[in-house]
Image (tube, rainbow, N blue to C red):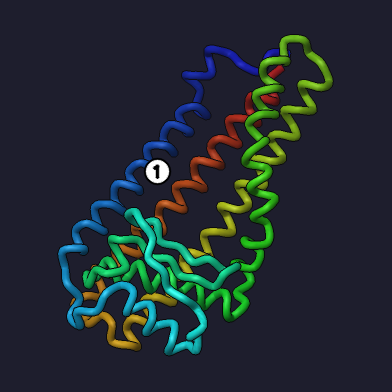
Amino acid sequence: MPYFYYGDFLSFRYMLLVAAILFAALAQARVTSNFNKYSALRNHRGITGAEAARMMLDSNGLVNVRIERIRGKLTDHYDPRNRVLRLSDSVYGESSVSAVSVACHEAGHALQHANNYVPLKVRNGIVPLVNFSSRFAWILIFLGIVTSAAGSYISDMAFNIGILMFVAVIVFHLITLPVEFNASSRAMEQMELAGIIDADEKKPARKVLSAAAMTYVASLTIAIAQLIRLLAIRDRD
């Protein structure tokens, strides 16, 4: 049976997907806006993002975690395999509230790794499966759609396997939420304890981290909306 109908464009599920995409765009715009706004606000100690991350790591006994500079803006990440914290140009050498907030958030992931934080271990463990699934899910779904007119068993099987692979991607997005929120929580706590931010800088720092966290919520929302859409297509008579 055919999987696609032109009337789908006006369906509630299609509108849900559009709403999710708009939400993601707004979340990303908010990240950029808050980061740029508080990049102009120098932290009271005048320390850079790299220095703040180093303070946080060393105070927790993670002297073996290296910090490297990478190109780009907001390309910051922690590499658990090599135990390296990589900070972007807009964070590494900058002494703004935005820079120290993002740097300490990434250092929070290093703390999670050192403390065997379960959600992080699970997320890292399923990365190979998710990479494979994200690469082939849409290929199988597309194959199921283009061959659906023939009504073959193979088209149904391809479509269903593609959906199962896509579910793996959603699980990854779901596990990512506690990982990211916890890293931000650790960052706020450590920045306050170490005096990296003062009372006046606490609210701006939280805004930067909260806006970043919402992008992960948006990614999950889009993925779920896509899944609902795919299930509706599959279940059509």
Residue positioned 79% across, 28% down in the render:
157
For the C terminus, which image quadrant? top right
Relative placement, left or right, of 82 versus 214 is right
Residue bearing mark 1 = 24
As drawn, the residue found furthest toward the right would be: 153
Residue positioned 56% across, 42% down in the render:
224
Could you tell me the amino acid type at mark 1? Ala
As drawn, the residue found furthest toward the top would be: 150
Residue positioned 72% across, 10% down in the render:
149
For the N terminus, which image quadrant? top right
Q: Nearer the viewer, residue 111 or 202?
A: 111
Q: Nearer the viewer, residue 233 or 125?
A: 125
Relative placement, left or right, of 76 versus 176 is left
Relative placement, left or right, of 115 versus 128 is left
* Residue 92 position by quadrant: bottom left
How far from the left and from the top, in percent, is residue 222? 49, 40
How far from the left and from the top, in percent, is residue 236? 68, 20
Relative placement, left or right, of 103 versus 236 is left
Neighbour tally class for label 1: few under 14, some 14-19, many 20 plus, Cα within 10 Å = many
Which secondary structure, mark 1?
Answer: helix
* Residue 102 position by quadrant: bottom left
